[in-house]
Amino acid sequence: MVGGTVPLVLLDHERCYRAVTSRDARFDGQFVTAVRTTRIYCRPSCPVPPPRAHNVEFLRTPAAAQAGGYRACRRCLPDAVPGSPEWNVRADLAARAMRLIGDGTVERDGITGLAARLGYSPRHLNRVLGEELGAGPLALARAHRAHTARLLVETTALGMADVAFAAGFHSVRQFNDTVREVYGVPPGTLRAEAARRGGHVAGAATGPLTLRLPYREPFDPYGLLGFFDARAVDGVESVRDGTYRRTLRLPHGPATVSLDLVTVAGAVPATLRLSDPRDLGPAVARLRRMLDLDADPEAVDAVLGADPALAPSVAQVPGIRLAGSVDGAETAVRTVLGQQVSVAAARTAAARMTTVLGDPLPADLATPAAEGDEPWLLFPAAATIAERGHEVLTGPARRISTVLGVCAAIASGDLALDPGRDPDELRAELVALPGVGPWSAGYLAMRVLGDPDELLASDLAVRRGAEALALPGDATGLRARSARWAPWRSYAATHLWRAAAARSAPAPTTTRRRTA
């Protein structure tokens, strides 16, 4: 286990204990250490001296620890860590369920709705999650609610009743009981402890929320900034001075976010403005996927760096990340708009459409004028584009028809673009739509689902990057060579895109790697 990703199905006691005794932060989020004598569970890197080996058990999730009667350590905060990278690699039922639970599906649709989204019965889902993760969907959702509640208690001045309902609890009593069970103290004590640590934000109950989104080192922020900057849609996104800002459509209303990717090691500071605090949990989950913060970069770099052709690129840019998505429908529209045109042309088309069909932010979310021309528009909803896109879209009739068809399928519910989808099933549904080809389907699996093993071998920039690194430049030869890069071929494609850009022009400042 040490040196790679922890398998979830079987946790080796000796290897896990070795990671704990070395306080190896690489394994935070991959398992938790439950101490039988204190009934407390911790992250592997907890600064408290490790207990004796026979007094601990290792569990796959905080939910499993909580179900076993353990409470979270208030010193190391085991829920405030990157998530398990297993959810990036696996596309099975357990992984897809965990991604949807993190997105707040249980709070919005219940266990029945979660099971329906995954295509299984609630009974089967409960059995599989219990066997795989040591906790059923209700316990996993409860752990997610407890984490969201702690964030709201510690980072806002919201009243406790407002925190309870924003986090998804059905009553204040249920909220109080859960916080006591999970953290061992009432919510008021968590807020007081956060104030002593300097983490509590005093002031009004509404306004911006400032959070830290942790990640595993190494981390390449400039690759993400360069990717977002090249594709930023005016009014929706902006990149300036190492900060990415954008508007968001969340389940209960609009929001804005500002992400400072370069100034804090180990975490990305995020400033959120929410129209509804119930959207905090889904917002955090989507931002983490967009920035690929739950990745295991050492495992990725070890595999890709073993290939002599990729090794120099991996050494130059360790910790490369996949640029993900906060809105599957938006990413699908922008992907289709970008078929067979340049990135700049796709960006222009998306901006033109958004100016006409996008929704302005409500006044309470608008950025103060003193802060400059910040994002102020929401990307158009799929239903709006399906109905009125023909008024705005220009270019080949086939591409316009494809955009309208994809949006109609999303608006009707025939096409679901969420992190709970099976990648192969989603690809099949996409290519069945008129005008959507394998490249777009693979690209969306990479961006929306975080599929780590999509090479996009037919992509022209990928093939040019391969040639720049003395790799086969034809799709067939590149696919054959890429077998040794599994299961991280999406990350290899990102390296090849960068090699293609470096070959055609000098690398801009925003793509330089941050030094330690």
Image (tube, rainbow, N blue to C red):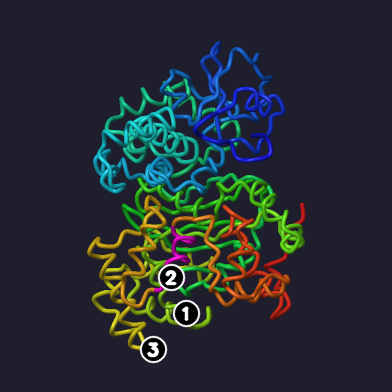
Give the percent coordinates (x, y) of residue 424. 40, 57
- Circles 1, 2 touching at the beta carbon (< 8 Å): no
Q: Image point 36% across, 57% down: which residue? A: 425
Q: Position of residue 462 (x, y in %)?
A: 60, 72
Label 2 environment density (alpha carbons within 10 Å; few <14, some 14–19, many ≥20): some
Mark 2 and mark 3: span between their CA atoms? 21 Å
- SS for tag 2? helix
Query: Does the magenta run of residues contain 162?
Result: no
The image shows residue 163 at horizontal and vertical percentages of: 37, 37
Which amino acid, mark 3? Gly
Give residue 73's position: percent from left, percent from top: 55, 24
Query: Identity of the amino acid at label 2?
Result: Pro
Residue stretch in magenta:
437-448
Q: Nearer the viewer, residue 242 or 11?
A: 11
What is the spatial separation of the Cα atoms under label 1 and label 3, in whole angstroms? 11 Å
Residue at mark 3: 395
* Marker disc for residue 346: 1
Front disc: 1 or 2: 2
Of discs 2 and 3, which sits in the foreground?
A: 2
Q: How far apart are marks 1 and 2 (CA)?
A: 18 Å
Residue drawn at x 46%, y 71% as measured from the top left: 439
For image coordinates 48% across by 31% down, the residue present is: 61
Please state if 152 lies on the left or on the right of 229 as rendered: left
Q: Name the residue under label 2.
A: 438
* Depth order, front residue of 236/389: 389
Helix, strand or loop at label 3? It is loop
